[in-house]
Image: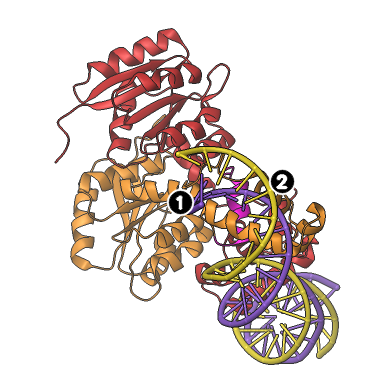
Chain colours: A red, B orange, C purple, D yellow
Amino acid sequence: MTSTAPLRLALVEDDPELRQLYSDYLCRQPELTCVLLAGSAESFFDQLPDLLQAPQVVLLDVGLPGRSGLDALPRLKQLLPDTEVVMHTVFDDPDRIYQALCRGASGYVLKNQPLAELKAAVLEVARGGAPMSRAVARQVLAHFKPMPTAQAGLLSVREQQVLEGMVDGLSDKQVATRLGLSPDTVRTHVKNIYRKLQVSSRAELLSRHAKGQL
Amino acid sequence: MTSTAPLRLALVEDDPELRQLYSDYLCRQPELTCVLLAGSAESFFDQLPDLLQAPQVVLLDVGLPGRSGLDALPRLKQLLPDTEVVMHTVFDDPDRIYQALCRGASGYVLKNQPLAELKAAVLEVARGGAPMSRAVARQVLAHFKPMPTAQAGLLSVREQQVLEGMVDGLSDKQVATRLGLSPDTVRTHVKNIYRKLQVSSRAELLSRHAKGQL
DNA sequence: GGTGGCCTACCGCATTTGCGGTAGGCCACC
DNA sequence: GGTGGCCTACCGCAAATGCGGTAGGCCACC
């Protein structure tokens, strides 16, 4: 059942030395084939039409010159919706990680890892996993634990949880289910949140939240 | 720098056979010590005061009788804020995973894994990682990005104008005023936008927009 | 000439939301 | 003991929203 054919991999990395290093190592693996090597997002897209078969996995550097890996990601996923993308970078800041995941990356590994980790990540994502370096995984989880909207004193904990649900696009009823409350209770919380934050509709709330005004 | 002292582990698992199996295996590892074995959340909390030192990691079953692992989690984190909790369960539904992470779990491994995985997860979380089974990691990422849409040319100009108004937090009527249209026309556009972007409420739309998915 | 998308505008109906109350239990502060 | 905040939950009502239609005019493409 597992494919005997090697996995088609594309590698996008601007540093020529590193690109060489990675491709040397990865292509030596029997499970992998590098079908595309690029030093920039533009080069990647240029080379795409030449391929007989699309890559199954793309290792994408974040810190590319010109169009960054992050910028290229939406277009990449649009052109190759079934291709898994693993971000590969030195950056482990929450914002870049968040952006990458929001734009469709299925993995995020840091560059200070041994090469074997890189190979493992590629294979893992092809198997339906979501390889993440230690620090990255923690960042991701951190997104759930604290409330993203932390204007501490104003809203109570419960209200922040309700707000969280609304920010995720849920209806009152869905929020109630998530928190194990009566829909009416959620409605009460919503009313209080509106009062405290001086808004008068869900749309206004989400709009302001998007603008970072919350 | 790495502690030579074994890691203090607590195991909460209601099935006596499984508990025995896990504790036998895990305690045999030189890196670990089981300082607490419990068959329920209540038992866990009862035994806590007897410990000289708090456990560094808790392996917590989700499907506990009475107070479920999910319910016990907030209290646990409150009492032991520096203890890492790894959920251990057969359930891989998004909601339970989400609940666990929101309540402070730092890992989530499924029960169909080999024992070595369990040990690896415990050590990984103690090292500051966030061990997650393959399926779980995917669920977590899915939370950031389901991505059915890439709408470069998808929306017409008019629809984008309407969308813009919605993103600004305006109601249908306000959008109509801004664009000099009938509210009904705006409503038609909104319906078409929802269809094209595969959403079914304003909140969902704004939520996705905030995540940069639009 | 037909097809199909877009823009406009309306109807009807069910659900959701916004907004005003009330209310009991709990807990902390004075 | 009173006051006030928080959490819970309900009632009622008006407005907004979601969803299914229909429909005419315009324009482009085949």
Mark 2 highlights which residue?
A212
User: Three-letter amino acid code at disc 1?
Assistant: Thr
x 36%, y 38%: residue: A82
Verify whether residue B202 appears in magenta. Answer: yes
Disc 1 is attached to a residue of which chain? Answer: B
x 36%, y 60%: residue: B93
Residue B83: mark in rendering: 1
Find residue B149 and report its horizontal and vertical position in percent: 50, 46
User: Element at badge 2?
Assistant: loop
Residue B136: mark in rendering: none
User: Element at badge 1?
Assistant: loop
x 40%, y 73%: residue: B67
Q: Is residue B26 above or below residue B173?
A: above
Find residue A132 and report its horizontal and vertical position in percent: 40, 36
Q: Is residue A160 above or below residue A37?
A: below
Instruction: Locate the C terminus of chain B by quadrant.
Output: top right
Disc 2 is attached to a residue of which chain? Answer: A
Q: Which residues lie in the magenta part?
A: B200-214
Verify whether residue B52 appears in magenta. Answer: no
